[in-house]
Image (cartoon, grey):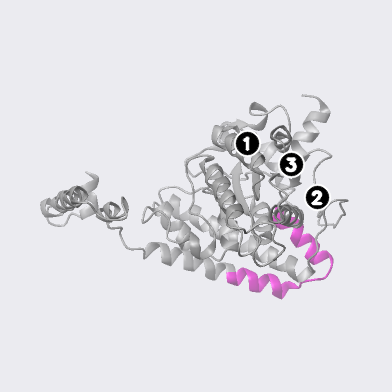
Amino acid sequence: MTTEGLWSAQDGGPELVQLLTPEGERCEHPDYAFDLDDEAIKGFYRDMVLTRRVDAEAIALQRQGELGIWASLLGQEAAQIGSGRAARPQDFIFPTYREHGVAWCKGIDPLALISLFRGVDHGSWDPKDVNFHLYTIVIGAQTLHATGYAMGMQRDGCVGTGDPDRDAAVLAYFGDGASSQGDVNESFIWASVFNTPIVFFLQNNQWAISAPQEKQSRIPLYRRAHGFGFSGVRVDGNDVLACYAVTKAALQQAREGGGPMLIEAFTYRMGAHTTTDDPTRYRLQDELEHWKLKDPLARVKAYLTRGGLVDDDFFTALEAEADELAAHVRTGTLSMPEPDLGAAFDRVYAEMTPELRAQQQWFRDYHASFQDAAPEGATHSAEVAR
């Protein structure tokens, strides 16, 4: 790899849109500007701190056997908070399984996310209430759902009317690994041909589990959009101001009828792909240390403190709020009731069929038989596990 190639791989190259440097200094870009005040930046910092704390608590719960798995967002807080805050209430969002920060922006209780990873339910929020779809585990599948939904928005007359309270767009999230999936490429085709109001938000965290970016593409990922006939841009995914500004502009273009856009948020997964992954087996510690210097929270903190915009009381109060949120997550998780496994049959069809009712009853009887057969002192769950 040439020196130029190495620089591009580590720092995003000269095409990177950046409005806040890793040292916490504001900078300008000819095409994108951050139009909010410092109070909003303080709010973004709060969002990122609290989201990171939820993430840390969830990892601890998984390590203690309380969650089956957890997909961490550590290092990707700026990409998610910046883009999530750029969406309007009428915009509809399609996440993967890692968009905990975007869910936070939509007002979803972290316990609603954790219940999915605990196996209590399949997602306990109603997408219609918050315009935030349920998590999608199948890699890249949500981009097809998102493109179809955006086509529906067109046909419902919610695009290009000039009414800021009516015009809407779709924001679809996926990762660099998903960009190699057929579903994603098919969604690009449909979005381009039908000029759908959708923004594809690609969080390039450099690793598709253990596969590095250079094993997936010989060009920057945002340039793939050009081959499908729409525009793409690469933004500093660790810069919350730039992520907000670029996403806001892209969503407005989509709402006005300008068609799709691909945003590549150039960021880094600081932790493991999920709690079942060991990143030390495929990446070097030097790489991690390089990206730690670009921590999305540290650069905003540097900006706030250097400008005298906050004092120690601000950070003390925020730490106390984070502690309270962590306690909410922990106690809420441990108090979740055991799921009614037989209820899964209720959700197969809109109306229960006699055959399905019979299968449900058989399952309930079968499940109850383990409890009946359990020896004195043995727990029901232990007997089932046997």
Pick the residue in front: 279 or 252. 252
Residue type indicated by callout 2: Gln
* Disc sitting over residue 232 in the figure: 3
Residue type indicated by callout 1: Ile
User: Dot 1 surroundings within 10 Å: few (below 14), some, or many (20 or more)?
Assistant: some
Q: Residue 307: where, in percent of width, then height?
A: 84, 67
Is residue 54 in view? yes
Determine which quarter of the picture holds residue 338.
bottom left
> Residue at label 2?
18
Tell me how far mark 2 sits from mark 1, CA to CA.
29 Å
Q: What secondary structure is found at the residue carrying circle 3?
A: strand
* Disc sitting over residue 340 in the figure: none
Which of pointers 2 and 3 lies earlier in the amino acid sequence? 2
Say which of marks 2 and 1 sits in front: 1
> Residue at label 1?
189
Q: Which residues are magenta?
A: 296-321
At x 30% / y 58%, what residue is drawn? 339
Q: Residue 292: where, in percent of width, then height?
A: 70, 47
